[in-house]
Amino acid sequence: MRRTSSTDTDLLKEAGEHVNTPSRPENIFGTKGAATDFFVAESYRPYQKETIEEIEAAFQQGFRYVVVDAPTGSGKSHLARALAFQANDAHILTIQKLLQDQYRRDFSDMFVMKGRNAYTCLQGELGSTCAEGPCRLKKQDPCFGCPYVRAKIKAAEAPVTVHNFDSFYYQNSFGSGFAGRKLMVIDEAHNISGKFSGFLSFTINSRGGITVPKAHKLADYDAFVRLAWTDYSVELQKLEEQHEYDGLSKDGLNRMRELSKLTHRMKRYLLEREKDNPAEYVFDYSEDGQWAPKVTFSPVFVGDYASRWLFGYGERILMMSATILDKDMFCKEIGLNAKEVYYITVPSSFPAAHRPIIKKYAGKMGYKDINGTLPSVVEYVQEIVDRYPNRKGIIQTHSEKIANYLKKFLDDPRYTFNKDYQTPQQMLYVHKKKPGSIIVASGLREGLDLRGDLSKIQVFCKIPYPSLGDKVVARKLELDASWYGWITTVMFVQSLGRSVRSSKERAVTYILDSGFGFFYTRNKRFIPKYIKEAIKW
Ligand code: SF4
């Protein structure tokens, strides 16, 4: 089989020859060649070639949606690249900006499009971004050579463009946006539902003429939300007119942006409430101490909106993640009929002996018992860390409470507390430099790549159950108890994947929460086989 390396591709392009030569048969995207012809790595990792062929076959069979559940380190970005260049007309969406940068590093032939704040304005104060340019304060034609506008033009013209989820959503919802493509690839697809929930939730604060009432059921808020929406829309219209004719201050611009998002979300909510069978929302009223009352509305399921808004940008959709874990559950989350989705599970090729999961129970970590167990957690963490004086690693606390407790009682310069840094990147910089550094973090389950020597020990203080204080979580649990087990397993498996990133790497994981056995028994059906094999019972 012939593989086209990026060097080959560049040479062909330079010679004015299109890489899709007429000698290859036409494929499902109307271009020439099999998807494997567009694979560019030196060699295939285990299962990679079969997976690319299976994805292509599923599209040929007529499936519009293909979901690939493949473990961390299995080379998903190369699958994305092969299919995207076969289509020669694709959007790739990543949830994390870090992953977007990884695509940029790995594939120089893709165009990476970011949000306005990633480009330097030619007109503003020194160092200001295109999110802060003078054109933002007063409506005007873009400057000649504006880096953001140029990037958008290039992104629209590039055969394969990599976006991050947030900038893609906001550019399409509030800007000129992007046209649909033959293929849309969504990496880290298990986050789709959470992302849309964030995009659709909104908070109304008591402010100006608006005072948030306390209500007991959603319907009691309908008239209030409508009135608030009218007030906000009037205020927004005034600001937009001022923006067009006189210009705005920075505060005015921020308020206009805030109102633009808020009214957009409220309108969606109001339209739902008018339907005979509206999408369900939950509300969370709070009047915290000195703060004026506020209320937050969040959709329980985002499926309908995700389907229309997201999947509308691709004729065919490829979704990839290490933690789909259950086809039906995933499809329900994003509003797809499971029968219309082709699902591929890729096994792990990393030896189980390289990534043992060892139980070293400090005690119960549930709500009622955690305070009594925390002193043992401190003791056990220190004991484990002392056992490996030269290894780097990570303590996954899974809650702020535990992270704060460890910060207070762990006294060893080896610890690098994530909360001491403004960004995970700054923390990582220190972790890389410091010998034997051990990261202590509460929420770094995704996007953190601790390959090589950066982490050989992982300690899980607690099973990462999502908080039941979150009204959406509580409602979903009420509707389907197995959903709670599934989402916890998603978070557990994501956390496990931070350290062993290739078949040659090794890391040991310790579980301190004695509730692990219960979690395992209840959620066995979601836990991938390759993880079950690594557990030392
Ligand atoms: S159009 Fe001009 S002022 Fe506006 S962001 Fe671009 S360079 Fe800056």
Image (cartoon, rainbow, N blue to C red):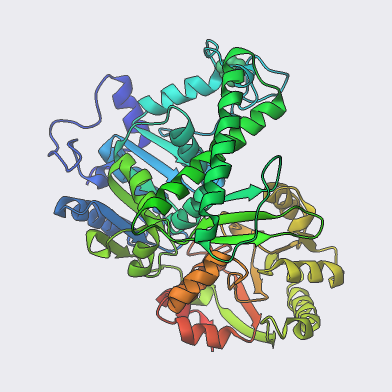
Residue 327 figure quarter: bottom left
The residue at the far top in this view is 144
Of the pair 518 and 504, the residue shown nearer to us: 518
Q: Is residue 146 visible?
A: yes
Q: Residue 101 at x, y = what percent? A: 53, 41
Q: Is residue 144 left or right of residue 413?
A: left
Q: Is residue 162 left or right of residue 180?
A: right
Residue 229 figure quarter: top right
Of the pair 355 and 365, the residue shown nearer to us: 365
The answer to whether residue 386 is above or below residue 38 is below
The residue lying at 48 percent from left, 24 percent from top is 151
Q: Is residue 172 left or right of residue 136?
A: left
Q: Residue 309 at x, y = what percent? A: 37, 44
The residue lying at 58 percent from left, 73 percent from top is 465
The residue lying at 23 percent from left, 57 percent from top is 54
Q: Residue 184 at x, y = what percent? A: 34, 43
Q: Quadrant of ligand 1?
A: top right
The answer to whether residue 159 is above or below residue 348 is above
Of the pair 322 and 250, the residue shown nearer to us: 250
Q: Quadrant of the C terminus?
A: bottom right
Q: Is residue 110 left or right of residue 340?
A: right
